[in-house]
Image (cartoon, grey):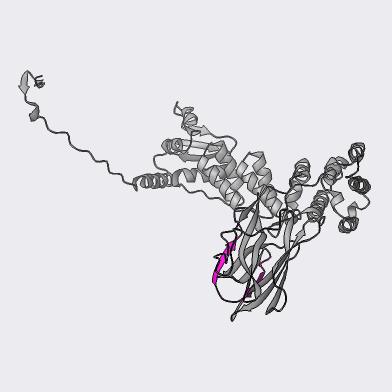
Amino acid sequence: MAEEQISVDGDVNDTEDLEPEKEVKAIYDDKRPQKLLQTAWQNLQSGLYTDVIVIVDERKFPAHRLVLSSLSDYFPPLLKIDEKGKGEVIIQNVSSEDFDILLKYAYTGLVDITPDNVQSVLIAADYLSIEFVKRECTTYMKSHIDIDNVCDALIFAKSFVINDLEQKAFKFLLENLDSVSRTVGFAKLDSHYLAKILDDDNLVLFQNQAIMRSKDREKLVLEAVLRYLLIRNEEDPNLIQILISSVRLPEISEEEVKNCLESYKQFRNNSIVKRSLVLRKKALYIISQKEEPEFASLVASASEVPSSWFRKRKLAFYTITPGLRSYASGGEVGRVNDHPDFKLTDANFKIQKIEIWTRLWDTAEIIGGMKIVYQSMDGHCSDIEYFKGVSHHVENTHIVELEPNEFIIKVNIGSGWLIDSLCFHTTLGKVYGPFGGVGGGIHEEIAPRDSPSYLFDMGYQSVVTQGSPAIYNLCLRWIAFS
């Protein structure tokens, strides 16, 4: 096919006479957008080139339409209202102080947030569809939750459906209920909402970063309820009944209930409290018949007793995970058969006591024997003991006794062919050890940090070497709650 010719003014020209297409390279000046904002801000401060006035709370704010229209989808329709050129638009439901902050953000990208204005700025940003400011205000509030403002944050988050803020505040409340319940802000919580929280079968409370169980948890719930009623000077019998019923009173001894009421004498003669104590005794009797055939009928006939009193609160959802590795498991001094057996299966038990016996191996001090005592946290079961190794003819004896709400969150292990040393760190900031010698490499295991967690148990074996037992093949297991 003949090559197509291009005709201009009747002349036929060769295509080779056309200039080749030139390469175009787009170069981006990343300082240009910032320069534009800086210039716009300077012009606003100087009153130059403004083409609209925004009226908020009868206060007039000169501005540039271009800047406002770039701020959010709220503004273009608003600016169209002034198409006739009057030069003024009105914004309702926003304070002039908050709009001043948002207008500065429109020109500078800076948001002046303080503890005093963060809620109102967030509300204004939400109303004007300024997502960045709304998100940053939420982040600010989440990072500034404390004992005194957590209830305000929780109420605010529920009112404006800010789920991540509500979750953060709710978690903080449960982790610090004892301290929070002593604040004035605690009384601002809705009574029915608080009762729903405290009555939950899955209620999980914390003390010293560890989960509280059974009677300690119920004592705290009772004290929190009494503080709430006292601060509010509550007299509504229905609300008092609802809140008192949220406490699992059968879990608390009669003496402990009386001691608690001694601190809140205003309620000792309260008719609802007195009636609840009578119902507590009735519930205890029915619970004592749990193994009897008539138990179900007894529960059904006790309609005046809160049904939740016949149920134990459940543990939080939890996972038990193995530690990083097995220690002294190379088989140099004895055959290793996979992981050692673990004694513990019930998450309601905790390590209460550790006894360690050290002995000499050649000239090095090693762990010759170890016994762990696991204690039931609700007091309903006997202790469980796990012992391996030797406890006599030893070099040194070490005993670690943990407090009821003290848990191990870090372990240092010295190990080589055998377990040379152990050191334990707890939620109370205490350090026990190191116990043993300086041989072997030093290893560290830490409780998972994504959720409340602590050392659940330890499995280990003993082997006879140089005529006496020694500990080897040590593994840790951690429990984490969600």
**Is residue 257 shown to the viewer in this render?**
yes
Q: Compared with residue 211, is residue 161 higher up or lower down, i.e. above or below? A: above
Residue 180 in percent (x, y) is at 73, 54
Q: Compared with residue 70, is residue 346 higher up or lower down, i.e. above or below? A: below
Closer-to-camera residue (156/143) = 143
Q: Residue furthest top?
A: 10
Residue 337 in percent (x, y) is at 60, 60
Q: Is residue 398 magenta?
A: no
Q: Residue at x 61, y 58 (%)?
A: 339
Q: Compared with residue 40, is residue 65 higher up or lower down, i.e. above or below? A: above
Residue 56 in percent (x, y) is at 55, 38
Q: Residue at x 27, y 44 (%)?
A: 27
Q: Residue at x 5, y 21 (%)?
A: 12
Q: Viewed as shown, does residue 372 lie left or right of 29?
A: right
Locate residue 120: give its quadrant: top right
Residue 195 in percent (x, y) is at 78, 43
Q: Compared with residue 360, is residue 51 higher up or lower down, i.e. above or below? A: above
Q: Which quadrant is the N terminus positioned in? A: top left
Magenta stretch in the rendered image = 428-448
Locate residue 69: give its quadrant: top left
Closer-to-camera residue (419/222) = 419
Closer-to-camera residue (425/39) = 425
Total numbered circles: 0
Q: Residue furthest bottom?
A: 363
**Is residue 100 shown to the viewer in this render?**
no
Closer-to-camera residue (309/84) = 309
Q: Is residue 442 magenta?
A: yes
